[in-house]
Image: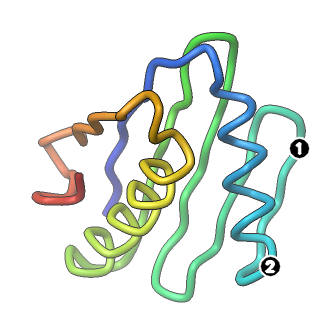
Amino acid sequence: MNAQTTFGTDQARRYLATLFKHFGHKVPVQLDGDLGLIELPFGKCRLTADDTVLQIEVSAETKNDLDKVAQIIVSHLERFAFRENPRIEWNQASGPTNAA
């Protein structure tokens, strides 16, 4: 299962770097420029940044795990981007129901 969302911000690359630095102390991460992967025990998160958008895709085997991955990523993004008060809405077709 997977879900996608985007966060429009001119700080996308900064938030990408911050998320990877934070999660890199806890779980495996792979960062290559503006593209990265965070590997949580129950799912994965791919992030891509450009000048105006942070694109987020989460994946997991079950709906519960998908919701958990999404919630963890969003809660950290909200903490790091608190000045922008991000409102994250996931793709409803396959996305978490209450991740934001």
Q: Residues within 10 Å of mark 1 (few under 14, many from 20)?
A: few
Occupied quadrant, residue 23: bottom right
Disc number at residue 5?
none
Query: Label 2: how many residues lie within 10 Å, few (<14), some (14-19) or many (20+)?
Result: few
Mark 2 secondary-structure assignment: loop
Which residue carries the number 2 mark? 25
Residue 36 in percent (x, y) is at 74, 49
For the point 43% across and 63% down, the residue is 59
Q: Residue drawn at (11%, 58%), measured in percent from left and top? A: 97
* Mark sitting earlier along the chain (1/2): 2
Q: Are marks 1 and 2 in contact (CB under 8 Å)?
A: no
x%, y% of residue 77? 49, 49
* Amino acid type, callout 1: Asp
The answer to which image quadrant residue 71 occupies is bottom left
Q: Is residue 16 left or right of residue 9?
A: right
**Considering the numbered disc 1 on the image, is that residue within a helix, a strand or a loop?**
strand
| Number of marks in picture | 2
Name the residue type under label 2. His
Give the vertical position of 32 relative to 69 (above or below). above
Q: Is residue 92 above or below residue 67?
A: above
Image-based side of 9 in relation to 95, left or right: right
Q: Nearer the viewer, mark 1 or mark 2?
A: 2
Q: Please state which of residues 40 and 10 is positioned toward the viewer in this rendering.
A: 10
Distance in Å between CA atoms under marks 1 and 2: 17 Å
> Who's the residue at 54% across and 59% down the image?
45
Q: Say if 59 sits above or below 74 in the image.
A: below
Q: Which quadrant holds the N terminus? A: bottom left
In the picture of the structure, the residue carrying the numbered disc 1 is 32
- Asked which colour scheme the image uses, the reply is rainbow
Q: Position of residue 60 (x, y in %)?
A: 40, 72
Q: Where residue 46 sits in the image (x, y, percent)?
A: 59, 50
